[in-house]
Structures are given as C-alpha cells and as structure tokens.
Image (cartoon, helix red, strand yellow):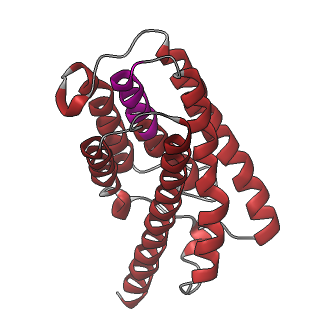
Amino acid sequence: MLTQGVLAGRRTFANTMKYVKLTASSNFGNVLSVLAAAVFLPFLPMLPVQLLVQNLAYDVAQLAIPWDGVDRDQVSSPRKWAGGDLARFMLLVGPLSSVFDVVLFAAMRHYDPATFRTGWFVEGLLSQLLIVHVIRTQRRSRASLPVIVATALVAAIGLALPFSGLFGLVALPAGYFPWLAAVVLGYCALVQAVKTGYVRKFATWL
C-alpha cells in the first residue's frame, strides 16, 4: 500500500508538471501571436468572447490530464519543482505556435474580419489540442483513453462552432482547410523536432 501511494503521488506530480508546462507554453505563444496580429492588422484579430471560449474549451480538454499515463522514469525516483526548467521550456516551446499563426495570418490576409477571427479561433484551438499529444510525454507513447476522447470531443466542437453562428463565428470557406491542415501538422512536426533536440541537450522534457 505504501509503495502504491508513493507511485500515485509521483504520477500526480508528473501530470501536474505536464499540465503546467502545456498551459504556460500555450499561453505564452498565444500572447505573442496576439501582439503580432495587433501590429499588422487594422482590426481585432479575435474578439474577447472568442478568446474566452477558446481558452475554456482548451481547459475543459485538459481536465483529462490527471488520468493520463506517464513515462516509467518519471515515477522511478523522486522529482522536485524546477522553476528554471519551466521558464526554459516556456520560452523555447511557446513561440513555436506563433510562427505558424503568422503563416496562417498571411494566408488569411484577404479574408473579412469575421472570417479571419473564425479561422484563427479554429486553428488556435486545434493546434493547442493536438500538440498535447506531442508534448505530453518524452517517449512516443499513446495518450490515455480519457485524454484522447477529451481532445477529440473538444476538437469536434471547435470545428462545429463556426456553423452555429455563436460568439461572432462564421462558416469558413473550403480554401481555408488545406491551410489549416498544413499549419497544424507543420506545428506538430516542428515541436517534435524541438523536443528531440531539447531532450538530447538537457536530458529532460517534462
């Protein structure tokens, strides 16, 4: 019983750090993207209510993180909070999403403001959800069923919302979706490459 309690505590700590690093890097990247959009666009890149809904949807999906699995080496020995490692992770991983946000901004520069906001809303939400499966573990293990179901469900809701007309969102043109796929997949591939280099250099990830 004591051993099981210790392992449960280590899993809880590992998943807590996973959530903190995911959220910190995601929020940092979002702030950079908003600043970049504010500089180059003559209108608000996303309405306040859209940002709130996007963040709420992402946070709901993250409620499944406590039931996610962790790498064996994360529970094989005690670990402690490392603020410096968190800052380094956030500064290296966070801006990667902004690179692809700017690419999408360029692709959507001719869209009207409502369509632009909707396109960024969908891309931002999907990229945050899918990148969880890249960042969540140092090794290439599959996420737990609750995490898979939560991210898939919230992604489906995010794709459906523009057709509802709620929150100022509008239906997206067909030409948007190839760009969406390219941006999201490119972002995941870049984060995977950065993760590989990060682990080689610092011998840690989460």
Magenta-colored segment: predominant secondary structure: helix
Residue 116 in view in this figure: yes
Residue 45: where, in percent of width, then height? 42, 37
Residue farthest toward the top in the current orientation of the protein: 174
Q: Residue at x 33, y 24 (%)?
A: 114
Tell me the quarter of the image containing the N terminus. bottom left
Q: Position of residue 176 (x, y in %)?
A: 48, 16
Q: Can residue 142 be seen? A: no
Find residue 109 and report its horizontal and vertical position in percent. 53, 22
Q: Residue at x 61, y 40 (%)?
A: 188
Count up the numbered dots: 0
Quadrant (top left/top right/bottom left/bottom right) for the C terminus: bottom right
Left-right relation of 161 to 192: left
Q: Nearer the viewer, residue 114 or 50?
A: 114
Q: Residue at x 45, y 61 (%)?
A: 23
Give percent across and percent down for residue 63.
29, 58
Which residue is more in the foreground, 137 or 179?
Answer: 179
Segment colored magenta: 112-124
Q: Residue at x 37, y 59 (%)?
A: 65
Q: Is 137 above or below relative to 174? A: below
Q: Is residue 118 magenta?
A: yes
Asked if residue 183 is among those painted magenta in the image, a careful observer would answer no
